[in-house]
Amino acid sequence: MCRKYEVVQGQKGVPIKAWTCDVAFEQAAKQQLLNIAQLPFVYKWLAVMPDVHLGKGATIGSVVPTIDCVIPAAVGVDIGCGMMACKTSLTASDLPENLGGIRSAIEQAVPHGRSARARKGRDKGAWGDIPHDVACAWRSLATVFDQLQEKHAVLKQTNNVNHLGTLGTGNHFIEVCLDEKDSVWFMLHSGSRGVGNRIGTHFIELAKKEMERWQIQLPDRDLAYLPEGSELFADYMQSVEWAQNYARINREVMMQRVIQAVQKVLHRTFEAHVEAVNCHHNYVNREHHYGNDVWVTRKGAVSAKEGQLGIIPGSMGAKSFIVRGKGNPESFHSCSHGAGRVMSRTQAKKVVTLAEHLAATQGVECRKDEAVIDETPAAYKPIDKVMAAQSDLIEVVYTLKQIVCVKG
């Protein structure tokens, strides 16, 4: 029987409480967490989720509570990245036997694929002419973005409105799933796209320059921080809040387009928000824990307050879960954001064969070519073990199995 968490304690800094029973916890990730734990403004302890793995600067699957400071690299560059899921009034019997048409319709409705780095020809993951629904959604974001551009001119040359309502690449996806009672769900994973990436990288570099200016030595340069009360801190928090709003709206726009696409294929309307969840898993938020107001940065972690619904996806061939938080104070009311990688993308492409990927995704209407092997199920931790390791953080409400998966 596992203890509910493992305590890792370095020679310096706060303890690390890790919900990693029976799941991989790589030494490099532990060292990265020990570096973070040394920072003098970390509050109480670090909470580590079972999907933990090495990140850049800060560890993916970590919850970092801080007093009077925020670490931009701990929030990361995919600010507000998260999940949205909607239960529909459809059941499996309402879907066609061949799901290729549904996948094709979703792929046509939502741009996906090449990243903001694409320079030759139109980026197929971005809009050319901005559709009416995207333009309408952008209006709620435009005023504050204009303010941000005035302060930080580097944000002017970004993919912003042309990425709103688009999926992206990597581990971002759109899925059609079935729950235990064969109800149809739509689920998707994306964040603040090109403009969020630019905000993140910009303020990470500014924080590093501040550390140099103040001659502050850190265990890792990527742990550069911004102190509350400074002008840069205020600018960063305004930018992060905007990017988190962008990410939430981005998911809402895509979800509506997915619903409309499936309605066209089925030649019928249906109720599409019987239940709905929209949650971040890369973000920072002001919260009250153990008698103090603190900044809680969740990098690859989901808020799991008592009664709060969240989403924990598996890989593209595994189960996913709609969960309800138990409000465990020791995890700072958090749970994992997914299964967590056990292989880098490069390693997965070297180790996993196309035949193995085909077998792992059998029964799922999805891409089955070598370009998506870095996202194959074998590249991720077993989702059942990840869920078992955090049974005191969440309870499962629905278990979902994907039948269609769209990736960039």
Image: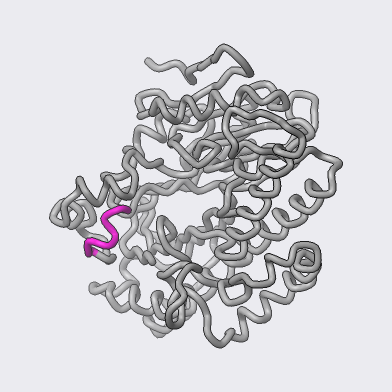
Which residue does the image show at 62% across and 70% down from the upper left?
158
**363 shown above or below 43:** below
Q: Tell whether position 257 is magenta.
A: no
Q: Quadrant of residue 38?
A: top right
Point out the image quarter for the N terminus.
Answer: top left
Point out the image quarter for the C terminus.
Answer: bottom left
**390 shown above or below 190:** above
Where residue 246 appears, as percent x and y from the top left, is: 65, 64
Which residue does the image show at 35% across and 32% down from the upper left?
385
- Magenta segment main secondary structure: helix
Along the line of sight, the residue nearer the viewer: 320 or 225:
225
Along the line of sight, the residue nearer the viewer: 275 or 27:
27
Outermost residue to the left:
355
Q: Is residue 33 left or right of residue 40?
A: left
Q: Is residue 3 left or right of residue 16?
A: left
Q: Is residue 50 left or right of residue 35?
A: left
| Residue stretch rendered in magenta on the structure | 368-375
Question: How many numbered callouts?
Answer: 0
Q: How is the image coloured?
A: one colour
Where residue 116 appears, as percent x and y from the top left, is: 50, 68
Which residue does the image show at 63% across and 75% down from the upper left?
161
Q: Quadrant of residue 165?
A: bottom right
Where residue 343 appears, as percent x and y from the top left, is: 31, 41
Q: Is residue 239 left or right of residue 363?
A: right
Which residue does the image show at 24% across and 72% down from the upper left?
97
Along the line of sight, the residue nearer the viewer: 9 or 248:
9
Outermost residue to the top:
11
Where residue 283 appears, as percent x and y from the top left, is: 63, 47
Q: Tell whether position 372 is magenta.
A: yes
